[in-house]
Amino acid sequence: LSLQLDSVDIRSNVVSIPSDSLCFVERLRVRLGFNSLLIGRFSIKEVLLENPKIILRKDSLSQYNFDIFPKDTTEQDSSSNTIDLPYVKLKELNLKNASIVYEDLSKKQRAQLDGLNIFGDAFCTDEIGATIDFEIKNITCSDQKYTFNNIPFSAKADIVGEKDFSKFSVKKLDVNLNDVKVSVNGEVELDSTEIQTDLAWFFGVEDMMILKEFLPSPLDQKLKKLMLEGSVAVDGTIKGTFAEKQLPAIAANLNLNQLTLYFKGYKGRLSFDLHADGLYDENKNANSYLKLKNADLIAGQSFIKIDGKVLNAVHNPQLQAHVAMAVNLDTISASFPVYEDLNYKGKFDGDVSLRVPIKEF
């Protein structure tokens, strides 16, 4: 059983935005498995949307063009939280070359996603789940202060959960925003009042210069000669309960590997390494800590090296640290030009150990 529609155009009936196109789809095709319908089950072989364009607009009166449905004024029965979902299998979802535009006319803001492609499958049987491959070729945003262009985004997900939404298993969630990569896997448990989590996660940055894409244009021009390379990795676990006045236990490792800053046309390099781990547990204050294995800032023969730890990190944090340094400002001034007409000279070194309650600061 197949249904295909061409040039589907859905328009808004909001008075202040007359005849406003809300969604246009060049081709919509749905193919169903007929035999499954006879036994009350939906087997959807394919859902295809080609070149859809969605326009979400807020006018000067704070009305949205997608606010087109009448509000439900019937009283809802809150005594039951049971959700009765139908049996559905979607074998192929294919969204090709979509475009989404959001405009706020009162604030002169605009954001646009181009080249949106989604391919995957989903099911609602004894469990619910989906496998999705998601891509955006270009993200553009502009308002009165900030502008960025040509930001690509992609994601892959494989998620399975209980039909009552009480528990989800994230088998894979990989996100890539212009070479900023995040991966997540683990278990999430939900109920009506709190969230139980057990997550393992990883975050890596391959090219730190992505940060410059989000800077305001005037500031980006000033920093156009500044280059930053390196990687950041975080892994750990979150276990416990999210509630109004309670946080779960968090254990994490942080590694900044060879972050290097330099200016184009200058030989100087400023490198930074950091390795740390920690545990935060409200119920076990004595076990909570933050340990800085090393934080090394090096520029030529100059260096600042720090190691230390924070004990009883929840209620009465105690800082223990060791700082060693040897800095030659003459060579740093020649390598890192802050301003063309500014020079700084001198040398200093030191070695300090300290132990003090953080509240004393």
Image (spheres, grey):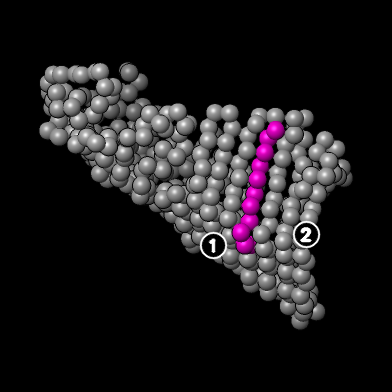
195 w.r.t. 300: above or below:
below
Q: Is residue 277 left or right of residue 120?
A: left
Residue 85 in the image: x percent, y percent?
Answer: 73, 62
Residue 206 x, y percent position in the rendering: 35, 50
Looking at the rendered image, the quarter that the C terminus falls into is top left
Residue 8: mark in rendering: 2
Task: Provide the residue designation for mark 1.
Answer: 133
**Magenta: predominant secondary structure element?**
strand
Residue at the image position 20 percent from the left and 30 percent from the top: 335
Q: As displayed, is residue 305 above or below residue 174?
A: above
- Magenta stretch bounds: 95-105
Query: What element does badge 1 sit on?
Result: strand
Tell me whether circle 1 and circle 2 mark residues in contact (CB < 8 Å). Answer: no
| Residue furthest bottom as drawn | 35
Q: Residues within 10 Å of mark 1 (few under 14, many from 20)?
A: some
Dot 1 or dot 2, earlier in sequence: 2
Foreground residue among 328 and 238: 328
Q: Quadrant of residue 4?
A: bottom right
